Image (cartoon, rainbow, N blue to C red):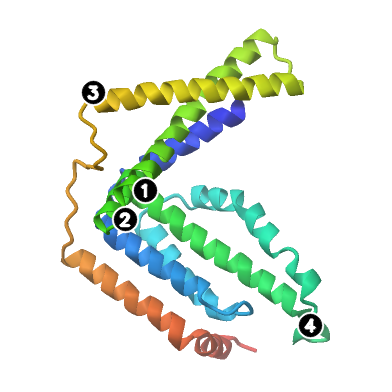
Amino acid sequence: MTRIDASSSHLSYLDSLAYRDSPIHRLDPRVKLITTLLFIVCVVSFAKYEVSALLPFAIYPLILLALARLPPGYILRHLLLAVPFALCIGLFNPLFDRATLLHVGSIGISGGWISFASIMLRFALTVSAALILVASTGFDSLCLALARLGVPRPFVVQLLLLYRYLFVLVDEAMRLSRARAQRSFGRRGMELSVVASLLAQLLLRTLDRAQRIYLAMQCRGFDGEVRLLRPLRIGGRDVAFLTGWTAVLLGLRFLDPAPALGHAFGELLPW
């Protein structure tokens, strides 16, 4: 039950972060969404052996994290939760790609390890940017931005309801877990039949509650249109943000300032 409570609190806290006031929070959601998508496209477009060229892209999530005044520890913890998925993708690269591409002293580094490092770096950059986008915008605002950008309305509504359904699922799971703990006198172990019964009950209860929620939404005039109390309006600050970051990201992608930065940093060292 502790894990379920923690999951519920994490979801609620992520929602609460979107209601903070900062220069990033006040930007139009469409501008932040387009900029983040451009950032992700630039990061994933590099060749599989690129590592140094990806490092300057860390400027984007770091600056947004500071300007949005988001807790770095919270973003880092959620980033680490997704690390096993990236490990599953890149862990076998060193086994299949054993050709030596780099020597560090007398140690040869194979292409598999370089591509593995590239995958992990891309993962850290893209996932952190996506987390900052959600935490500084809110899922409702993101869905409205998608609708305004021309994404089909059924897809947007399904995405929004799926996100909201997670809260229903966690709430029902907490109730089932609490009821089981009270009837089992604190025993931790569960047989397979008990687990299967709990999962079936969870599915039925969440489906029934989701149906009641949908009927309540219809009674209150829900017509499939995503609406917000705050209207979306692109101003000069939004245009400056989009233009500036577009220039920076495209410059990092096609100019590759990593060698120049490394040379300048090397000259600053005393040895």
Instruction: Return the residue at label 3.
Output: 219
**Tag 4 near tag 2, CB within 8 Å:** no
Q: Quadrant of residue 154?
A: top left
Q: Judge whether 54 appears above or below 212 on screen.
A: below
Instruction: Return the residue at label 2.
Output: 151
Q: Which residue is drawn at 45% across and 70% down?
A: 41
**Tag 2 near tag 1, CB within 8 Å:** yes
Question: Residue 250 or 148: which is nearer the viewer?
Answer: 148
Q: Judge whether 28 appears above or below 163 on screen.
A: below
Of circles 4 and 2, the one toward us is 2
Instruction: Return the residue at label 1.
Output: 155
Q: Can residue 22 be seen in this view?
A: no
Question: What is the distance, in whole Å, between disc 4 and disc 1 at their CAs?
Answer: 44 Å
Q: Judge whether 56 appears above or below 264 on screen.
A: above
Question: What is the distance, in whole Å, between disc 3 and disc 4 at their CAs?
Answer: 64 Å
The amino acid at mark 3 is Cys
Residue 184 image position (x, y, % from top left): 70, 11
Question: Residue 121 or 30: which is nearer the viewer?
Answer: 30
User: Mark on residue 99?
Assistant: 4
**Tag 3 near tag 4, CB within 8 Å:** no
The amino acid at mark 1 is Phe
Question: What is the distance, in whole Å, between disc 3 and disc 1 at their CAs?
Answer: 22 Å
Residue 99 image position (x, y, % from top left): 79, 82
Q: What element carries label 4?
A: loop
Of labels 4 and 1, earlier in sequence is 4
Q: Residue at x 62, y 77 (%)?
A: 48
The amino acid at mark 2 is Val
Residue 179 image position (x, y, % from top left): 59, 13
